[in-house]
Image (cartoon, rainbow, N blue to C red):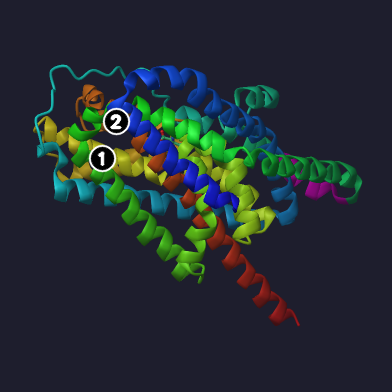
Amino acid sequence: MKLTGRIIIALIAGAIVGLLLNIFAPNVYNVLDPYLFTPLGRIFLNLISMLVVPIVFLSIILGAAGLGDPKKLGRIGLKTITYFLITTSIAIIIGLIVAGVVQPGEAGNFDVESAEFSAEKAPPVGETLLNIIPKNPLDAMTQGNMLQIIAFALFIGLALTALGEKTKGVLNLVEQGNDIMMYLVGVVMKFAPYGTFGLIASAIGSQGWSAIKAMGIYMICVLAALIIHGLLTYGGTILLLARKSPVWFFKNFAPAMSVAFSTSSSNATLPISMEVAQTRLNVPKSISSFVQPLGATINMDGTAIMQGVATLFIAQVYGIDLSLGELATVVLTAVLASIGTAGVPGVGLIMLAMVLSSVGLPVEGIGLILGIDRVLDMARTAVNISGDAACAVYVAETEKKKTIKAQRSGA
Ligand code: ASP
């Protein structure tokens, strides 16, 4: 059976096993989790995380050098960042509309008194942006600071282009290093079905079924907004901007989405989503290696959707009305928050504190959704990386047309 099929079966099996154990045999879960599910998941997570920093570093150097002229890099960069900002804004607006229409905060009695959340951990976004240029590149790599690694790699790629023949040897070395990493992604992926099973069984099994039921309407709102955004925004991008079939896109990208779903981490999924985009969605290496790592770091549409829904949900629970101006503030701060959200599990919730405080909503409200966020994190991470891939396909297809046009007018 093909790998995609095996991963999806593992995903469903993990969910069923986790849910059954949670409802009928929590004691068995308590034994199985530390000795089976968690180790399986951790092995897989560590295996793919191991490849992230070298892949981002090497592939961005190659991408920047492969694009050759810095003007082209600038054009692609601008297109990519504009796309990210527009789609993230659309994402939050969809989240706000769904929560505004369905009113999940009115659907039940929520225990506001005992809701607790301390918001100290949210990193300031301005700081993140200022720190893009690493003072110490090695430090950036050991810390896994993606934006800094991207910046350093871009500089090296541009230098390699400028120096041309003289540094051909280094470029070859980087190319071969990248080939080694991509080969390893293929090897690690063989373990994906087992890892996925462990991660999902562990995550679903630890979620109290009663907590899920109590927060049902809120969860359905987030999931519905994620699906609407995926179909409309990404489907629309693929159909109208890239002129390809959305079915082709989602079908081929499914393995990466399943891995994102099970790991809840855009960063950890990066090696796989890049490989899938390059081999199955025909995105040239130079574009994929630039757009996807950047997207995994700053483009988080799924997270933005959760933040939109959660903000309105909390406002409704606390009986606070938000004006149109305040809603606009929510859109703006959620875009910033999603840029500042690292592609690792659970950070979106921490950044939500920033959105809430921008319009004076009680940050403790996060305590209400804390319990079920693990499940939603899985779904939103799958959307987060799909946005990056949709952008990569869009950029690749429009660049292809540009080249063909240029060749024609040159001939
Ligand atoms: N887990 C998400 C990601 O890695 C970020 C978040 O929303 O917490 O994409």
* Mark 2 nearby-residue class (10 Å; few <14, some 14–19, many ≥20): many
Three-letter residue code for mark 2: Ile
Depth check: 5 or 213 in front? 5
Disc on res. 147: none
Residue occupying the point 55% across, 36% down: 194
Q: Identify which amino acid the numbered label 1 is placed on.
A: Met
| Residue at 70% across, 49% down | 64
Residue 38 in the image, given as x and y percentages of width and height: 49, 24
Q: Quadrant of residue 352?
A: top left
Residue 221, image x, y percentages = 24, 45
Q: Quadrant of ligand 1?
A: top left
Measuring 62% from the left and 37% from the top, which residue is drawn there? 191
Which quadrant of the rendered structure holds the C terminus?
A: bottom right
Q: Which residue is mark 1?
A: 219
| Residue 176 seen in the figure | yes
- Looking at the image, is mark 1 or mark 2 earlier in the sequence? 1
- Nearer to me, 40 or 28: 28
Query: Please, what is the dominant secondary structure of the magenta stretch?
Result: helix
**Disc 2 designates what residue?**
372
Where residue 214 sits, quadrant-wise, is top left
Left or right of 4, for residue 221: left
